[in-house]
Every structure is written in structure tokens, then in C-alpha cells.
Amino acid sequence: MIDMPFQSTIDSLLAFAYYYPLFMSYVWMCGGLYYRFHWERGDRSTPPALKNYPGVSVLVPCFNEAEQIEETLRYLALLDYPNVEIICINDGSRDNTGAILDAQSTVYSNLRVVHLATNSGKAKALNVGALLAKNEILVCIDSDAVLDPSAVIWLISHFENSPRLGAVTGNPRIRNRSTLLGKIQVGEFSSIIGLIKRAQRIYGRIFTVSGVVVAFRRAALQRIGFWHSNTVTDDIDVSWRLQLDHWDVRYEPNALCWILMPETYTGLWRQRLRWARGGAEAALRYAGVMAQWRSRRMWLVFIEYWLSVVWSYVLAAIVILWLLGKFVTLPEALHVPTIVPGWHGVVLASTCLLQFFVSLVIDGRYEPRLLRNFFWMIWYPLAYWLITVFTTVVAVPRTIFNRKHVGTWVSPDRGVRAAPVEASK
């Protein structure tokens, strides 16, 4: 006999596993559409004319970037902005990155190169760059990223009349699309990352800036102690600290930055595990602050994160119970006959595809022919949901029981190299 309260709990968890992603999908779509018609109205094909063009310092932390850094600098030289200094921080690279940077400093007069003796991590490299920068606005990009020529103008336009603005995050776009994982990530960055940032911006706070392209006000960073080197993901941590200090953080979809992403499951697993650990670390580290009334604007982001964690554990349990049921006899309440979607799955899959369609249409004004990636998104739940679920399941206990972290870094899996995709301007 199955205890009725126990059976009720099992039924509630199964319902949660189904209804949570369904509900959040419509929240993100409604928020994204509202953002589109409220903040993305009108002609955004040309950059805005600014009253002033304050100096901008572009910080580029580098570690073993001999293959990418020349291309990154070549595109930075094409920036459509009159007052830019570029600071490359060579964080103890073991290849010839340092020699390449020294050679490039003779080519670009606005390039300054800083060499650190040992690999101390991206956060420390950014801190060094921020202390040496001449300007108040700091634009941070990864050393393998290709920044769109008008991206800086779009980012700076937010700072003109917003003294409480601490950061503006840009719109990362995938360059390498030669494999199924690469094609799926094109849609993911629109429908998951871009759409969620738009929706979160509606209720006032976002989970994280994109570390590959973001502009900061140096005074805001100074107030919170700049970047912390004892974090897994410096971008998530700095986003939470800025917003808990009551600085505004915005999203600018026109600030395009072309990036390379993993195209193997091993590389993808390592990347998403790091992201999951960074999210868990921030949620745990600042949980006590969340109890304060002054942090109320972060409550929805905080609650949304922990609901997603619970959902990941529930879904992982369903998959594990289904596998166990193939080898042992389980109680009826725990028996999962199949994970092949029934009519519930059809509704969820249809909603998922609708979300992808909405997001691709919204982002289509920034990248031409984006909708041609819609077909590949049918594989998203299989390719990415399980990775997201199990990286979360692994990351939370690992973060709880291993809170010490030294912010050194290694070169990530960047997939297959490809030329930047031309943006529609």
C-alpha cells in the first residue's frame, strides 16, 4: 500500500516537472515581447547620435590566445567610436601570446599591453586593467571575441542620462555553426539567453551580464570592490553585487559580439558545469542578503533560480527512476513507464518551439536569416535540457561542499573556427 500523502507528493512533483517549464516559457515570451515593443521600437538599424563621446577603455584579458588575439584586435581597430583605448592583459600565457601582443602594440597606437608573471585568473586580470584604465567606462570582452563596429556606441548610449547605471550587457552571437551543437546554440542564445534577459529586465533585475561583452561604470565597480578572484564565474558574481548595491544593469541587443562556443559534448559539459557552479555560488553566497527588504528587487531572480534547481533535481529523479525501472521492480508510485512524451510532451514541445520562433523573430532584426536555424531547435531538449539538468545536479552539492575557489583559467573548447557573421545594419 502506498501512503496517500506520499502519493500526493509524487503527483505534485510530476506536475511541477511539467508545468514549471511551461509556465516560465510563457513568462519569458510575454516579457520578451513587452521589452521588444517598449524598448526596441522604431528604427534601430543605425547607432544613436550621442551628445558626448566619453572616453572608453576596452579591457581584453588574455591567456594562451595566440590563435585568436590578432583577429580580436583587428576588429577592435574598426570600432566606430572616436575615443577608445585598448588594454590587453596577458595573464601569464604559456604560448607566444605575449610576443604577439607586444608586436601588435607597434601596429595600434591606442593599444596598451600589460604582462602578468603568472596565471592569476580572469578576475585579477580585469582588476589590473581597470586600475590602469584612463576612462570611466570600461568595456570588457573575451580575447577570442569579435566586437561589432557599432557595439560601443550602443553600450555608451545607456550611460548618458542614467547616473545609477552600473553595467550594460551586450548581445553575444555564435560564430561557429558547422555542427548540430553549433546550430542549436544559435537559437539558444536568442530564445534562452536573449529572451530571458529581456524578460528579467522587465521586472528590474537580470541574473547575469554576458562576460564576453559588457560595459561597466568604473565608479560602480569601485564601490563593490571590483571583480572577486575567488569565484567560479566572475560575471555572475559581479552582476549580483552591483544590483544588490542598487546599481541598474541593462541589456542592449544591438551591441553585437561574435563568439566561439564548444561544439563537443565534453566542451559543452565543462562550460555549462562552470556556469551552473557560478549560479549556485552566487545564490548561496548572497542568500542571507536576500532576506533584507532592501534586496527585494532581486527576489524574483533569486526565486526563479532556486525553482529551476528544484526542477532540475525532479527531472533528474524522473530519468533515474525510469532507468531503475528497467532493472528492478519499483513501487507503483515511483514507477516511470516511459520518458517518451505523450500529449503533455506535445504541448510542452509546441510551447518550446513557439518560444524559439518568437525569440528568433525578435532577434532577427539584428542578425539576418536567423529563422533558418528554427528547424534545428527541435533537438534542443534532447541536446541541452539533459546537460542543463545534470550540470545543475552536480554543481549545487559541489558548490556547497567546496566553497574555496582560485580564479585561474584554462583555454576553453571553442569549437570549429569560423568567420564572423555579418550583422544587419
Image (spheres, rainbow, N blue to C red):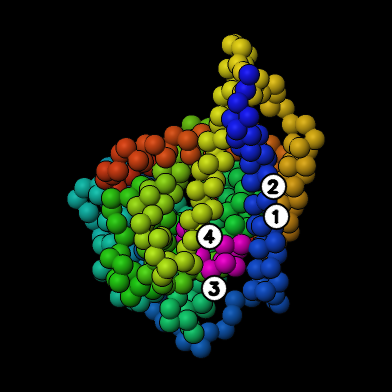
C-alpha separation, residue under disc 2 versus residue under disc 3? 34 Å
Nearest to the eye among marks 4 and 3: give it: 4
Q: Amino acid at mark 2?
A: Leu
Q: Real-space Cα distance between discs 4 and 3?
A: 28 Å
- Secondary structure, mark 1, is helix
The reply to whether dot 2 and dot 1 touch (C-beta < 8 Å) is yes
Seen from the viewer's position, the closer of residues 9 and 228 is 9
**Labelled disc at residue 154:** 3
At label 4, counting other C-alpha atoms closer than 10 Å, the crowd grade (few under 14, some 14-19, many 20 or more) is some
Q: Nearer the viewer, residue 57 or 15?
A: 15
Which type of secondary structure does the marked residue at label 2 adopt? Answer: helix
Residue 64: which disc? none
Residue at label 2? 22
Amino acid tagged 1? Tyr
| Distance from the alpha carbon under mark 2 to that under mark 1 | 7 Å
* Residue 385 percent across, percent down from the top left: 60, 38
Label ID, residue 300: 4
Circle 3 Cα neighbour tier, 10 Å, few/some/many (<14 / 14–19 / ≥20): many
Label 3 SS? helix
**Residue 199 located within the stretch drawn in magenta:** yes
The answer to whether residue 85 is visible is no
